[in-house]
Amino acid sequence: MADTAADSLSDFLASAVDAARKAGEIIRKGFYQTKHVEHKGQVDLVTETDKACEDLIFNHLKNLYPTHKFIGEETTAACGTTELTDEPTWIVDPLDGTTNFVHGFPFVCVSIGLTIGKVPTVGVVYNPIIDELFTGVHGKGAFLNGKPIKVSTQTDLISSLLATEAGTKRDKVTLDASTNRINSLLSKVRSLRMSGSCALNLCGIACGRLDVFYETGFGGPWDVAGGAVIVTEAGGVVFDPSGAEFDVTAQRVAASNPSLKDAFVEALRQTE
């Protein structure tokens, strides 16, 4: 029985990789067009690209796995359902890093995660602009373009590279809270990166480019479902910024290597 389960997981991964690569082609085409359109057109192009990618991914996976459930940024917004059940559920962000996409900044990706029993089990994150494909399957390790990846071995917060995002809200209260937290953390880490994609930040932790990452108030489970598997399989930890257990539906995430978690949670607590 266990073998069958493992076989189906590798099938799920192969199907997700196919879907991500196909969607990546659409993103790549749109990415190089964005610089030549008026602002209004950019918004339309983002929406069109988003929608085309999600349709492609969902159609691809629904044909293969008609009984599976689907949660996506576009569909969910339209149908108003993010209810995560124990059923195998594909959670998809067809275009993470839309602001980057509009500006031609090459940090955009497709993120595909599969949860089984609410646990992220298969993850694929593909950046088609720099052609980096991150994959992870529960119990099978994490890979970048087919080569195994591991989280960093950094043990000191002060030598760590921190990633976060300022968030999309621009009201004073939210901005003050987010910049105060960042100010407080800056004296405790080496430097800060805001690359504009939650999924790629998680992959950065997984391959050791980044040491610590947190973000709150992002779009939904589609931002983290794929990356969470990849971090865990690369030997990292994914948790709530409070230090509590990670909840894929909570719009709160933090990740690091195991050595940095406690110090990082403490540093975050001091910013409250």
Image (cartoon, rainbow, N blue to C red):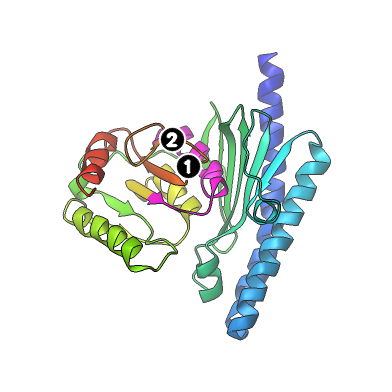
Q: Say if 154 sits above or below 223 in the image.
A: above
Query: Which amino acid lies under the numbered mark 2 shown in the image of this protein?
Result: Phe
Residue that appears at 63% across and 70% down? 46
Query: Which amino acid lies under the numbered mark 1 shown in the image of this protein?
Result: Ala
Mark 2–mark 1 contact, CB under 8 Å?
yes
Residue that appears at 22% across and 53% down? 185
Q: Say if 251 sits above or below 187 in the image.
A: above
Q: Position of residue 5 (x, y in %)?
A: 68, 21
Dividing the picture into quadrants, the one containing residue 183 is bottom left
Task: State which mark lies toward you, 2 or 1.
Answer: 1
In the rendered image, which residue does mark 2 sit on?
246
Position of 128 with respect to 265 (left or right) is right
Q: How many marks?
A: 2
Secondary structure beneath dot 2 equals loop
Q: Badge 2 local density, few (<14 within 10 Å), some, or many (20+)?
A: some
**Which quarter of the rendering shows the N terminus?**
top right
In the rendered image, which residue does mark 1 sit on?
250
Residue sitting nearer the eye, 55 or 77: 77
Asked whether the viewer can see residue 10, the reply is: yes
Residue sitting nearer the eye, 173 or 37: 173
Secondary structure beneath dot 1 equals loop
Q: Position of residue 144 (x, y in %)?
A: 52, 46
Start-end of magenta stretch: 215-237
Is residue 198 part of the magenta span, yes or no?
A: no
Q: Position of residue 142 (x, y in %)?
A: 51, 37
Asked whether the viewer can see residue 207, the reply is: no
Q: Badge 1 local density, few (<14 within 10 Å), some, or many (20+)?
A: few
Residue that appears at 63% across and 39% down? 83
Q: Position of residue 79 (x, y in %)?
A: 71, 51
Position of 232 with respect to 181 (left or right) is right
